Image (cartoon, grey):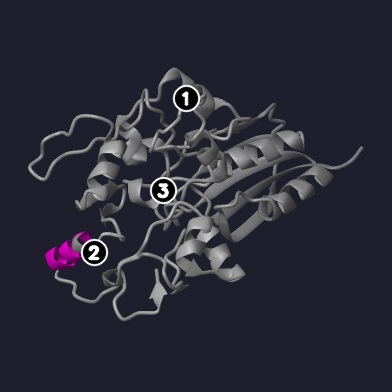
C-alpha cells in the first residue's frame, strides 16, 4: 500500500481575489485528496491528505498551474499528523496580523467579453461583469482577508442565479467575490453636471454626448476618467482649458487591436502588452492621417 500522509501548505503572494481557493479545491478533488483551504491575513493556508504520490503531484501543480492572475512569492509545506478527513472544503477566512498582497484591478477577460456581447446571456450589456479571472480587486477592498464582506460589494446581496454560480465548484464564478448581474448588482446611470439623472440608456446617451462635443466623466471603481471625442478639435481644446493642461498628452481608448493598428504602428511586443490583463497605456508611433486631432498629443510622434 502506498504511503498516506497529510501536509500543511502556506502560500503567499497575490493569491486572494484570483480564484486560488477554488483552484485548490478542484485540484484536491481531482487528486482524491481530503482536507481544507482558507484565506488568512498572510495569504492562503491549506491542508491536504491522501496518497503520497498524489500529494506530490498536487503540490507541484499548486505552483505550475496557478490561476492566471495569481503571483506566488513563496510556497512551503510540512508533513503533519493525519486526521482521516472525509472530504475537501473551503473554510471561512481567518484574520490576524500580517501583510497581504491583493491583485490589482484587471481588465475584462475573453470569457466575460463573450457573455457581455451575447444577446442571449443574462449579463448581456452589463457593465460590471466579472469572474475569478478578471474584474476589480484592489479598488474594492475595505479589509483583509479578501472576502465579499470586506469589499464594497458587501451591500449587494447576490440573487439566486449569482449565488448558484458562486457556490458551484465547476463554475467560473465559484467564490468570485465581486460576482453580480443586472438583477442584484450595481447599476449604471448618467447625471448632468448639476446632479440630475438623464433619461434613457446611460451608455447610448453618453455616446451621443461625446459625439456632440461634450466631456463625460466616467466613474469607475478607482476614480474618474474624463472622456472626450479625440476627433473633435474644439472638444479636446475645451478639456485642455478646463484641466489647465496645455501640452500633456491625453491617453486614447480603443475597442481592440485592429482599431489601435489604424491609429498607430504596432509591433508584436506592443500588441502583447495591449492585450495583456493589465491593459497598460502603451506608447505607439503615430500613423499619418489617423484623424486624431493634434491637441491630443501636441508636438509628439507617439500616442498613448
Q: Which residues are magenta?
A: 235-243
Foreground of the two, 292 or 256: 292
* Image position of 141 (left or right of 114): left
Quadrant including the N terminus: top right
Side (left or right) of 63 relative to 223:
right
- Please give the label number shown on residue 233: 2
**Whole-percent x and y of residue 135?**
44, 45
Depth check, mark 1 against mark 2: the one in front is: 2
Gap in Å between the C-alphas at discs 3 and 1? 23 Å
Placement of 299 over or under 35, stated as above or below: below
What is the spatial separation of the Cα atoms under label 3 and label 2, in whole angstroms? 36 Å
User: Which element type, helix, strand or loop, lies under badge 3?
Assistant: loop
Residue 181 horizontal/vertical position (percent): 41, 28
How packed mark 2 is, by other alpha carbons closer than 10 Å (few <14, some 14-19, many 20 or more), is: some
Numbered disc 1: secondary structure: loop
User: Residue sitting at 30 percent across and 60 percent down?
Assistant: 230
In the image, residue 287 lies in the stretch drawn in magenta: no
Residue at the (39%, 36%) spot, across then down: 148
- Picture coordinates of residue 252, whole percent (x, y): 37, 61
Q: Which mark is residue 122?
A: 1
Of callouts 1 and 2, the N-terminal one: 1
Task: Kindly indicate the quadrant of the structure image that contains residue 170.
Answer: top right
Q: Which residue is mark 3?
A: 137
Mark 2 or mark 3, which is nearer the start of the sequence? 3
Whole-percent x and y of residue 116?
48, 35
Residue 115 versus residue 67: which sits nearer the camera? 115
The answer for how far apart the CA atoms under marks 1 and 2 are is 39 Å
Amino acid at each position: 500500500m502506498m504511503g498516506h500522509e497529510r501536509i500543511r501548505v502556506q502560500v503567499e503572494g497575490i493569491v486572494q481575489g484570483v480564484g486560488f481557493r477554488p483552484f485548490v479545491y478542484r485540484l484536491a478533488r481531482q487528486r482524491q485528496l481530503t482536507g481544507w483551504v482558507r484565506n488568512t491575513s498572510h495569504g492562503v493556508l491549506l491542508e491536504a491528505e491522501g496518497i503520497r504520490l498524489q500529494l506530490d503531484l498536487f503540490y507541484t501543480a499548486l505552483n505550475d498551474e496557478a490561476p492566471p492572475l495569481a503571483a506566488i512569492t513563496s510556497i512551503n509545506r510540512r508533513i503533519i499528523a493525519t486526521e482521516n478527513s472525509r472530504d475537501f472544503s473551503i473554510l471561512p477566512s481567518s484574520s490576524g496580523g500580517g501583510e497581504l498582497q491583493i491583485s490589482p484591478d484587471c481588465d475584462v477577460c475573453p470569457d466575460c467579453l463573450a457573455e457581455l456581447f451575447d444577446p442571449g446571456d443574462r449579463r448581456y450589456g452589463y457593465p460590471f461583469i466579472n469572474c475569478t479571472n478578471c474584474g476589480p480587486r484592489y479598488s474594492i477592498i475595505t479589509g483583509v482577508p479578501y472576502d465579499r464582506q470586506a469589499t464594497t460589494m458587501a451591500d449587494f446581496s447576490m440573487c439566486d442565479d449569482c449565488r448558484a454560480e458562486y457556490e458551484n465548484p465547476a463554475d467560473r464564478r465559484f467564490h468570485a467575490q465581486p460576482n453580480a448581474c443586472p438583477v442584484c448588482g450595481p447599476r449604471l446611470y448618467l447625471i448632468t453636471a448639476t446632479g440630475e439623472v438623464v433619461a434613457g440608456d446611460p451608455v447610448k446617451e453618453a455616446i451621443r454626448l461625446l459625439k456632440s462635443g461634450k466631456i463625460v466623466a466616467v466613474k469607475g471603481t478607482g476614480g474618474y476618467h474624463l472622456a472626450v471625442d479625440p476627433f473633435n478639435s474644439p472638444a479636446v481644446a475645451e478639456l485642455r482649458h478646463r484641466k489647465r493642461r496645455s501640452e500633456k498628452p491625453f491617453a486614447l481608448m480603443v475597442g481592440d487591436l485592429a482599431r489601435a493598428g489604424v491609429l498607430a504602428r504596432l509591433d508584436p511586443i506592443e500588441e502583447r502588452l495591449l492585450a495583456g490583463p493589465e491593459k497598460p497605456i502603451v506608447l505607439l508611433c503615430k500613423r499619418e492621417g489617423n484623424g486624431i486631432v493634434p491637441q491630443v498629443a501636441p508636438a509628439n510622434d507617439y500616442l498613448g
